[in-house]
Amino acid sequence: MHTFRHSIGAAIVLCLAWNGSAYAADTPVEPGSKLTLERAIELALTYHPARLAAQSEAGAARERIGQAESALLPQVLGAAEYLRSTDNGIGDTSYLSPLGFPRYPSTGRNTNSTETFDNYLMGISAYQHLFDFGRTRGLIDERTAEADAARARLRFVDLDLIFRVTQRYYVLVAAAQKVRVFQTAVAQRTEHLHEAEVKAQAGLKPEIDTYTAKAELARAKLHLVDAQNAVATAKVALDNAMGLGSDAPDYQQADVLTYEQITSPLEAYLKTAFGQRPDLKMLEDEARASGARIASFKSDYLPTIGATAGYSARGQELPAANNVDVGVVVTWPIFNGFLTDHQVAEARLHQDAISHAIQDLRQRIFLQVKSAYLDWEASLQRIHRAEQTVAASRGELDLAEKRYEAGLGSIIELTDAQRRFTEDEAGYINALADFSIAKAALTRDTGAGPPER
């Protein structure tokens, strides 16, 4: 029995170990691991449903190129048919049956015999496109431009996901840092409450100091609850941006909030945006597709030429009669109710609309990039001001603590200094996060990002 229990225990341990290793292998983020921003972006571009949908649409657009190119290759069709039917003629008139067999009545009057005969048909035919004055090639060019537009749309989705992940990552980092700020504030206020109680019991300070310190400690604890809730909310938002949802385990952020000086001018970012913005590239591809559509429609003014060949075996008895045909087919739409004119006019107007949309987008790109650049500059200035504010408020708090310990300052002076220092530290963290988010927004608006996957 003892050996049996040991065997069961070993099996349970092995199963748990196997399940744990399998879970770690199947989970994009291992529980408790450090998650970098680069890894978070990689997860979003791998698992997010919006990205997967855009990727599938781009793949479907590429397949439509193959559909258009199939018209350049031989088209081969096979057919086989068996019918049991009557063979009644109409007077002395010969006619063609639905299968193309001539029927010659045996008498000079109408017959209505119910006798049926076997009819066999087997055949194969081939058609090779030769020339159509640009219709097929125009369709291929149109589908190619549409595929390029779909790839640009996929790139646009990538940039949006990268920004959302970056934004929510730094919001989570900032929220976690503010939790530590309020934890420190709770510890400070707990110490100050203890000091106020000791002084009040000794008769060195009035009883109101104790109640003031208790109220300030309660406020700090309330702010800590709000900060902890902000961390939980920010993590859910980041999990959603990465496309993990409820499957995301707990993890820690590896990156910290930092900043650097801005060295590149606005003109450099504008030049990058006009050269790399995927939505601008998408409109240009759509304009190219409209041009190809115009060429395709114009080809209807001219004939289409192709070669055809076929073999058929048909008759009422076996073996059936063999027939072979070969030739050239010329198709020319002489009049189609001005359909082609309207199609060409529609395609040209659509191309004009895209051209106007491109001009409108270029103006919006200028607005977005310049606004993002100005926000980035302003965020850097706020960081410098926040650094000065934190340094001053820290000195103010140190002095207020010393004055209160020496009996020269009031509890109001101390709690005001505490509150301002905590708020200024949280403000500095917000300024650092705003800098990183503003930089990410400028990166998105310029179309820069990781290379295409």
Image (cartoon, rainbow, N blue to C red):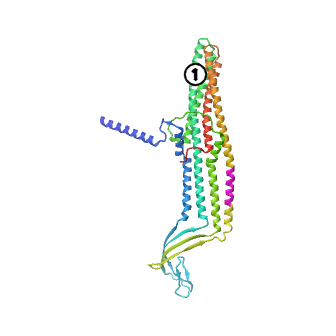
Q: Position of residue 445 (x, y in %)?
A: 63, 43
State the quadrant of the N terminus: top left
Judge by depth and name the residue closer to the eye, 295 or 217.
295
Q: Residue furthest top?
A: 203
Quarter of the figure with residue 288: bottom right
Residue at horizontal 64 percent and vertical 42 percent from the top: 268
Quarter of the figure with residue 385: top right
Tag 1: amino acid: Gln
In the picture shown, does residue 147 fall above or below 76?
above
In the picture shown, does residue 319 fall above or below 158?
below
Secondary structure category for the residue under label 1: helix
Q: Is residue 1 left or right of residue 139?
A: left
Main SS of the magenta segment?
Answer: helix
Q: Is residue 276 left or right of residue 126?
A: right
Crowd around label 1: few <14 · some 14–19 · many ≥20 (10 Å): some
Which range of residues does the magenta coloring cover?
346-359
In the picture shown, does residue 231 fall above or below 340?
above
Q: Residue furthest bottom?
A: 108
**Residue carrying label 1:** 188
Judge by depth and name the residue closer to the eye, 276 or 65.
276
Q: Position of residue 150 (x, y in %)?
A: 58, 52
Residue at horizontal 68 percent and vertical 46 percent from the top: 364
Number of numbered discs overlaid on the protein picture: 1
Residue at horizontal 59 percent and vertical 62 percent from the top: 137
Let me know if residue 34 is in the magenta part. no
Q: Position of residue 22 (x, y in %)?
A: 43, 42
Judge by depth and name the residue closer to the eye, 213 or 428.
428
Q: Is residue 249 visible?
A: yes
